[in-house]
Structures are given as structure tokens and as C-alpha cells.
Amino acid sequence: MNHIVEELKNVKVFYVATVEGDQPRVRPFSSVAEFEGKAYLCTNNTKEIYRQITANPKVEISGMGKGGTWIRVTAKLVRDDRDEARAAMLADPTGPSNLYKVGDGIFEVFYLDDVVCTKYSFTADPLVIEE
């Protein structure tokens, strides 16, 4: 499994930060899937986050793990318009299959590109997590 997907699933809820003009915006996420070896997130194209990502695809993601650990991910989100990618997201146990359907016209998926994931701890040196 993609190690970044694994880390995001381990924290269960993670926070995605985007930028709107000069204002940071942060919101919780819990859906993450692996498709073709890449980490994927999803949203819908009627939300502010979709407009923010399309204007500036750079994001940071953070989540608190167990035992005083946390992760920070910097990445660029790349839209994937393939139904296969959408289906993989919905098939994942964390996927929002109760909210979206392939072909519904609003469901969007993005993969993480140019990813740097670092795991931090109060008791150990930072650890870079590779895909």
C-alpha cells in the first residue's frame, strides 16, 4: 500500500489546508484511497475547496496520530477526470459512497503529486514517509 495513504488512514481525520487569496482555509477530511499507486482525495465541484484547488492546487495536510505523533503532507492536487479513479475512491472503505456516484456530475477526485510527507513525534526525530 502507498505509505502516505496508510498514514492518512491511520490518523482517520486529517485537515486539508488551501488558500483563498491571502486567507488560509482548513477543513476536515476522512476519505483517502489508493489508485494506481497514488494517494487520492475527493470533493465535489460545487464546494469552495474545489474552486480554491483549481485556482491554486498547492495544499498542506495534517493529522494527529496515536501516541503523540502527527503527519504533515505538502502536495499539489491534480484532478483526475477518469471514472475508474472515481470508482476506486468510492470502493475504498473511507470513500463517500453515500454522498456521490460515478457520473453524477459533481464528484471530483484528485491525486497528490510532488508529495512530501513527514511524520513527527514529541519523542523522536522527524521521519520522511515515501510513497
Image (cartoon, rainbow, N blue to C red):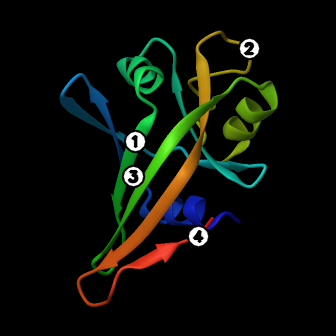
| The N terminus lies in quadrant | bottom right
Instruction: Say if 64 sits above or below 107 in the image.
Output: below
Which residue is tagged 3? 13
Spot occupied by residue 116 in the image (x, y as percentages of width and height): 48, 60
Q: Which numbered disc, 1 or 2, marks the residue closer to the eye?
A: 1
Residue at mark 1 to residue at mark 4: CA–CA distance = 18 Å
Q: Which three-letter amino acid code belongs to the residue tagged 4?
A: Glu
Q: Which numbered disc, 4 or 2, marks the residue closer to the eye?
A: 4
Dot 3 or dot 1, earlier in sequence: 3
**Secondary structure type for disc 4:** loop
Q: Is residue 115 left or right of residue 61?
A: right
Tag shown at residue 59: 1
**Secondary structure type for disc 2:** loop
Which residue is tagged 2? 103
Spot occupied by residue 44 in the image (x, y as percentages of width and height): 52, 20
Q: Is residue 117 left or right of residue 19?
A: right
Residue at mark 3 to residue at mark 1: CA–CA distance = 16 Å
Dot 2 or dot 3, earlier in sequence: 3
User: Residue most toward the left?
Assistant: 23
Spot occupied by residue 121 in the image (x, y as percentages of width and height): 30, 80
Residue at mark 1 to residue at mark 2: CA–CA distance = 26 Å
